[in-house]
Image (spheres, rainbow, N blue to C red):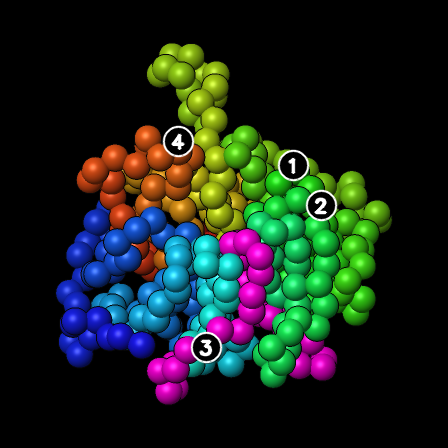
């Protein structure tokens, strides 16, 4: 573990549009993943403590042998798990400052998720080696390995269901009572590089509620109104209290949505770069987002001076509460 050079003092918030606060000493490379602890306002990308007025304090860092692609917390909110391009997942204990490797794949680990089951906590890792693995952290070997149809790009879990999105547009759903067998594909939201979000319900009886909508698109010119410029949806985050959600994209914009009323609740002012990752804190009062290059234009798009910022937005009730259905 190594501490930030200024970890003993709180930083001064820098106000930007809508008084969002810029976190000082952000990572120097593109930010791929953000996650808040369930126990306190600790934000993982590096480890920051967020104070009541948005002031931030760098707490700790630990290393991988390659870029870190995903982070999550355990149920108690005192351990961070990260997966990276070094094909490994590591766990950092904030109570003692120790880290250890807890998972291994044959290719980069794109997503890590902590899942609480009746039998205890399990770590799920999805990799570009086309496998999904479940780990009991008391053992060095996975308790189960599942072959995926393609490389894992995204994953989320709400016990007893786990959803995996892979390359070539595959969506796999697993019932964690039988975690190695794909289940029939309660609802989930999926974003795409086509500037579209789909709300899909698992059960046939709810299929009439499935819908998709276009977002993160722009007109070719002010007078065209053609929405022909299409941008990737980079992340979707659900509000932990109200069940509304955010989307962010390569166009540098963020929107809050109410899926039940099928309406947009709020749009942020465009940022100077793509939004790569977002997350709400445990009670939905803080919304964190990263402004970074998302590699949507390949290596040539990574130009000198590209912004790399971590921002905090204080959520207002009127921004995130559900609206009456039309």
Q: Residue at x 64, y 74 (%)?
A: 141
| Quarter occupied by residue 288 | bottom left
Image quadrant for the C terminus?
Answer: top right
Magenta segment boundaries in residue numbering: 94-123
The residue indicated by pointer 4 is 297
> Helix, strand or loop at disc 4?
loop
Quadrant that contains the N terminus: bottom left
Q: Residues within 10 Å of mark 3 (few under 14, many from 20)?
A: few
Left-right relation of 316 to 151:
left
Could you say whether the residue bearing mark 3 is in a helix, strand or loop?
Answer: strand
Q: Residues within 10 Å of mark 1 (few under 14, many from 20)?
A: few
Figure check: 298 above or below 241? above
Decide: marks 4, 3 in contact (CB < 8 A)? no
Q: Residue at x 40, y 38 (%)?
A: 295
Chain-order first, disc 4 or disc 3: 3
Q: Is residue 255 above or below residue 135?
A: above
Precedes in sequence: disc 1 or disc 2 = 2
Numbered tag placed on residue 230 in the rendering: none
The answer to which of 131 and 19 lies nearer the viewer is 131
Q: Is residue 245 visible?
A: no
For label 1, the residue is 168
Tell me the distance, in whole angstroms, between the alpha carbons under discs 4 and 2. Answer: 26 Å
* SS category of the residue bearing label 2: loop
Please give the residue where the numbered disc 3 appears in the rendered image: 100
- Residue 49 image point, x, y percent: 31, 73
Q: Position of residue 322 (x, y in %)?
A: 55, 53
Q: Which residue is mark 2?
A: 149
Q: Are marks 4 and 2 in contact (CB under 8 Å)?
A: no
Compared with residue 64, is residue 260 higher up or lower down, i.e. above or below? above
- Say how many tags the image has: 4
């Amino acid at each position: 573990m190594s501490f930030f050079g200024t970890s003993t003092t709180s930083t001064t918030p820098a106000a930007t549009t809508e008084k969002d606060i810029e976190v000082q000493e952000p990572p120097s490379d593109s930010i791929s993943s953000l996650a808040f602890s369930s126990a306190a306002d600790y934000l993982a990308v590096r480890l920051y403590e967020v104070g009541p007025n948005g002031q931030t304090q760098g707490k700790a860092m630990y290393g991988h042998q390659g870029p870190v692609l995903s982070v999550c917390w355990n149920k108690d909110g005192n351990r961070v798990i990260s997966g990276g391009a070094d094909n490994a997942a590591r766990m950092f204990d904030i109570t003692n400052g120790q880290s250890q490797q807890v998972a291994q794949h044959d290719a980069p680990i794109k997503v890590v998720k902590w899942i609480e089951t009746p039998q205890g906590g399990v770590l799920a890792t999805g990799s570009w080696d086309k496998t999904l693995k479940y780990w009991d952290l008391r053992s060095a070997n996975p308790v189960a390995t599942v072959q995926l149809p393609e490389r894992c790009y995204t994953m989320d879990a709400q016990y007893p269901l786990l959803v995996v999105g892979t390359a070539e547009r595959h969506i796999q759903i697993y019932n964690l009572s039988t975690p190695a067998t794909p289940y029939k594909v309660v609802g989930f939201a999926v974003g795409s590089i086509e500037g579209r979000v789909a709300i899909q319900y698992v059960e046939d009886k709810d299929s009439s509620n499935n819908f998709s909508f276009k977002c993160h698109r722009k007109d070719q010119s002010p007078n065209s109104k053609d929405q022909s410029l299409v941008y990737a949806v980079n992340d979707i985050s659900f509000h932990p209290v109200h069940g509304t959600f955010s989307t962010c994209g390569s166009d540098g914009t963020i929107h809050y949505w109410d899926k039940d009323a099928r309406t947009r609740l709020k749009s942020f002012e465009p940022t100077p770069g793509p939004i790569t990752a977002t997350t709400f804190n445990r009670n939905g009062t803080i919304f964190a987002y990263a402004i970074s290059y998302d590699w949507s234009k390949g290596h040539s798009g990574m130009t000198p001076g590209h912004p790399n910022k971590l921002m905090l937005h204080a959520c207002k009730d009127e921004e995130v509460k559900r609206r009456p259905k039309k």
